[in-house]
Image (spheres, rainbow, N blue to C red):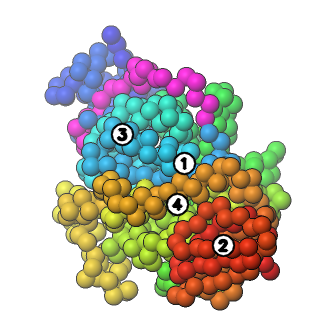
Amino acid sequence: MLRHYSVWAPDAERVDVRLGADGVRTEPMTPAGGGWWTVDAEPGDGRYAFCIDGGDPLPDPRGRRQPDGVHAASALVDPATFSWTDGDWKGRPLPGAAIYELHVGTFTSERTFDGAIQRLDHLVELGVDVVELMPVASFPVRNGWGYDGVALYSVHEPYGGPAGLQRFVDAAHARGLAVWLDVVYNHLGPVGNCLPRFGPYFTDRHQTPWGLAVNLDGPGSDEVRAYVLDNARQWFLDYHLDGLRLDAVHALHDESAIHLLEELAALADDLGTATGIPRVLIAESDRNDPRTVIARGVGGAGGLGLDGQWADDVHHALHVLLTGETQGYYADFADPQALPKVLAHTPFFHDGTFSSFRERRHGRPIAPNITPGWRFVASLQTHDQIGNRATGERLAQLAGRGRAAIGAALLLTSPYTPMLFMGEEFDASTPWQYFTDHAEDWLAESIRAGRQAEFAEHGWSDRVPDPQDPGTVEASTLNWADLDDLDRRKFLDWYRTLLRLRRELPELRDAALGDGAVAREGDLLLVRRGTLGVLANLGDEPGRLPVPDGSEMLACFGGVVLTDSEVTLSRDSTALLRAPLPD
């Protein structure tokens, strides 16, 4: 049976496809217009690679599987052969959702999709709605965070390849969980990137922290944009994914009249309408610009139309409150007004204000009557905020379990869409560190030196784990035996309770920007949400507050005693009450 092969190589004078694992059989390809080359040929064992102008064989830029690694031949995959069982799945819209970020390679000791499936029931019992997978596009090593992917259409083979991802999504949908995928369109990794040998996928008109920018607005960019859009379409249709988290969109340099992000939003909307399943797009953006999530308008008016965006300012304000750390970009969040502002009014502390870290004004104000709080994804912990520390300490390891419980209460009663990082919910004993296993000595040493130099400024250079040491990824893998510990199970129950209350109580589930109020009386913190109030004691001594008669304690962590007239909170304890709190 003949198979159709095609590749975009606009500057090539000759393109051949090599077929089979041995690459002995070669078929010349025919120009098909627009820089595309095609041929119909017998597939043999399914392996194939392209040769440009007689050069070395290269994997397909749109190859769906790299069974022998990103430097070897691609393999044919027919995603339609998978037997899906999620025909009744209706999707999960963003409003009211709670997200759980996980890394397949360290979520379980198996380091695979199938291993992760075995823990999905834990997430159901926890009470989250969405599983957000860190990147799974093929990258050139066994272990890594995934942000150095170079085969964007392929699924990392050690995790289980394309069929493994399909099994994971199908299993998640069977349990009522949506699945999002973190995708990286702003750069490719430093090893194994063959795209420049095919065409103008990159441009020197713009620069990024990783080098040349993806060519989104220069000569030849129409096909580069199609490469990205078709990739998103693949994840939605062939893998039944419910959403994409778009990495560092501020590094997608695009001066076109219609920004790539707007095109992605239109694609997701169209697919959602056609399938009846919401397709969600979430941006990681450093701009603090609400136009990212403002609806697309007629005639080019309006925003980019994405569903949501990460709100790091909320994390930073909570982190400073709970840890007392004020170095680097945390410095601005030591401002006493930072916490009240981000918990009650806006996710952007910097909404046109001066940022000392950037040494300039930053951000744009949000109109709360136009942009609801659920469009902003807020966290206590993420892969970045943990893993980019010298030793990958989690919040409870830095501040103590009581402070982490206070943070959970503040996050899960906020007006934003909450996201947890794997293991956060039971105070995992394991850190989450930066790990790689690059085969190239020059790259491994460059990474080591860069990490050492980065953390030397904080006096931590002697504490930085070697990313190349196999022990680093081992140390970062969740230890599910933690759940045998009684105190950790109590901590897990706290998260379950907060997530349940968030689902049940309209004041929490539908909280609006500007409706809350935050007050600080010494070490006592009070946050109001309608008739609900979160109280926390951040001091060393017990704290007391008067409360109205008839107040009801819905949940608490630590030493909390409620009487008819007052509530007493011991050190690092917190409570959620129903009743107006005292002014």
The reply to whether dot 4 and dot 1 touch (C-beta < 8 Å) is no
The residue mark sitting in front, 4 or 3, is 4
Marks 3/2: CA–CA distance: 40 Å
Marks 2/4: CA–CA distance: 18 Å
Q: Which residues are magenta?
A: 68-91
* Tally of numbered discs: 4
Which residue is most to the top?
1
Q: Which of marks 4 and 2 precedes in the sequence? A: 4
**Image-based side of 259 in relation to 570, left or right:** right
**Quadrant in the rendering for residue 74:** top left
The amino acid type, in three-letter code, at marker 4 is Trp
Element type at marker 1? loop
**Image-based side of 186 in relation to 503, left or right:** left
Mark 2, Cα crowd under 10 Å, few <14 / some 14-19 / many 20+, is some
Marks 4/3: CA–CA distance: 23 Å
The amino acid type, in three-letter code, at marker 2 is Leu
Marks 4/1: CA–CA distance: 14 Å
- The residue at which mark 3 appears reads as 118
- The residue at which mark 4 appears reads as 494
Q: Residue at x 75, y 52 (%)?
A: 506
Q: Nearer the viewer, residue 82 or 294?
A: 82
- The residue at which mark 1 appears reads as 128
Q: Is residue 83 inside the magenta stretch? A: yes
Q: Which of marks 1 and 2 precedes in the sequence? A: 1
Q: Which of marks 3 and 4 precedes in the sequence? A: 3
Q: Nearer the viewer, residue 132 or 146?
A: 132
The amino acid type, in three-letter code, at marker 1 is Val
